[in-house]
């Protein structure tokens, strides 16, 4: 069950990563983008502290639940710590959301990456970084 959650998390972030790669090709800067995304994911995803502490901050609470990592971490904790199965209702909801993220973000990521490739070809900056 846990392995399936990890695979779904990887798939849900694949599109976001491909999208970021396309932006790096065009703007030639990857470190700030990677650092910002990783920091926000760790801070709002429930890695550093429980999400219940964000409930009094509605904007941060909403942002936390817009990230796929939050759902993957919640499902992982339910499976590993609470003994839930993959088909229990609380885990199944997270699984469905991770699948939706993968279905939505992989095509968007591929489209942004294709745009990045076409743009650097047009500008003649394929060989530069």
Image (tube, rainbow, N blue to C red):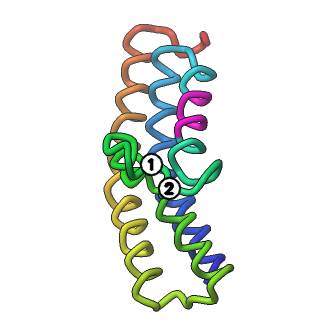
For the record, the magenta segment spans: 34-40
Judging by the rendered image, the residue that carries numbered circle 2 is: 51
Residue at 36 percent of width and 51 percent of height: 66
Is 64 in the magenta? no
Q: Position of residue 16 (x, y in %)?
A: 46, 44
Residue 57 location, x and y as percent? 37, 42
Q: Secondary structure at mark 2?
A: helix
Q: Which residue is mark 1?
A: 54
What residue lies at 51% left-to-right and 22% top-to-bottom? 25
Q: Of helix, strand and loop, which mostly describes the magenta segment?
A: helix
* Above or below, comparing residue 1 to residue 76 in the picture: below
Q: Position of residue 122 (x, y in %)?
A: 37, 13
Q: Image check: 32 left or right of 58?
A: right
Q: In the displayed structure, would residue 77 be above or below residue 48?
A: below
Instruction: Tell me whether circle 2 and circle 1 mark residues in contact (CB < 8 Å).
Output: yes
* Image x and y of residue 69, in percent: 52, 56
């Amino acid at each position: 069950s846990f392995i399936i959650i990890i695979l779904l998390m990887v798939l849900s972030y694949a599109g976001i990563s491909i999208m970021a790669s396309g932006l790096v090709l065009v703007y030639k800067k990857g470190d700030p983008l990677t650092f910002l995304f990783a920091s926000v994911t760790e801070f709002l995803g429930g890695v550093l502290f429980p999400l219940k502490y964000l409930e009094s901050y509605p904007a941060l609470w909403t942002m936390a639940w817009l990230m796929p990592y939050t759902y993957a971490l919640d499902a992982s904790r339910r499976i590993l710590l609470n003994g839930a199965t993959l088909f229990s209702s609380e885990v199944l909801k997270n699984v469905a959301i991770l699948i939706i993220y993968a279905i939505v973000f992989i095509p968007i990521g591929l489209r942004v990456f294709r745009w990045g490739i076409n743009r650097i070809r047009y500008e003649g900056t394929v060989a530069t970084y």
